[in-house]
Amino acid sequence: MSRKNTEEKNYCRKRNNQSIPIVLAISLIAVVVILSISYSPTVEAGTVEYKLITGTNDNKLHIVLLNTDREIINIDKKYEKFITGENRNLVIDKSLEDEIKARYSDIKYRVSIRKSKKGEIATYLVSRDIFNKLNVGATVNFEIEGSQRDAIKRLIDERYNAMMKEKINDPRAVLHYNYE
């Protein structure tokens, strides 16, 4: 084999060895970008269709309470004393939550929201605090986390949206707003 052929092979090997780290770096950057996009928080808007509380008893999932636009449906009559006839929005205080937990395990607060953009209804898990803030029939803005697309992380009010519009219109604006 000639010296020229040997030099060409060595050059190709060096070049291939140098391209491996570059390809790995580009691949790693692509993965990071894709994950950050898919796991980034998303702001949604929609109308609350209904709220419900579920719990497990005897290894069966039960709907404990259901709040529709017309009424609060008390599936388990044990909780009638906590629900007033005039209130159309179900609010769970600590004493009612304790009563429910005494009978059911794995209590979940859920809300179903008709999304403004697509018109589809999606059901989300929420904290008791968020559950109590949501009114059936109300239009809400909320944030869902990328890793848990079925859970509302927080509610976003109109003041936040107004400030974001102002920030977009004025690139010098600095956003300092506590939206919790």
Image: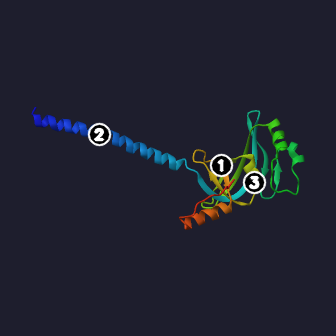
Residue identified by numbered label 3: 133
Q: Quadrant of residue 10?
A: top left
In the displayed orientation, state which residue is furthest to the left. 2
Q: Earlier in the sequence, mark 3 or mark 1?
A: 3
Most extreme residue toward the right is 81
Q: Estimate the spatial distance between the alpha carbons at disc 3 and disc 1, rounded to whole Å.
A: 13 Å
Q: CA distance from mark 1 to mark 2?
A: 45 Å
SS for tag 1?
strand
The residue lying toward the viewer, choosing from 153 and 113, is: 153
Badge 1 or badge 2: first in the primary sequence: 2
Q: Which mark is residue 119?
A: none
Tag 1 residue: 153
> Residue drawn 62% across and 50% down?
144
Image x and y of residue 121, in percent: 65, 55
Identify which amino acid the numbered label 1 is placed on: Lys
Query: Type of residue at label 3?
Result: Lys
From the viewer's perspective, is the residue at label 3 or at label 2 nearer? 2
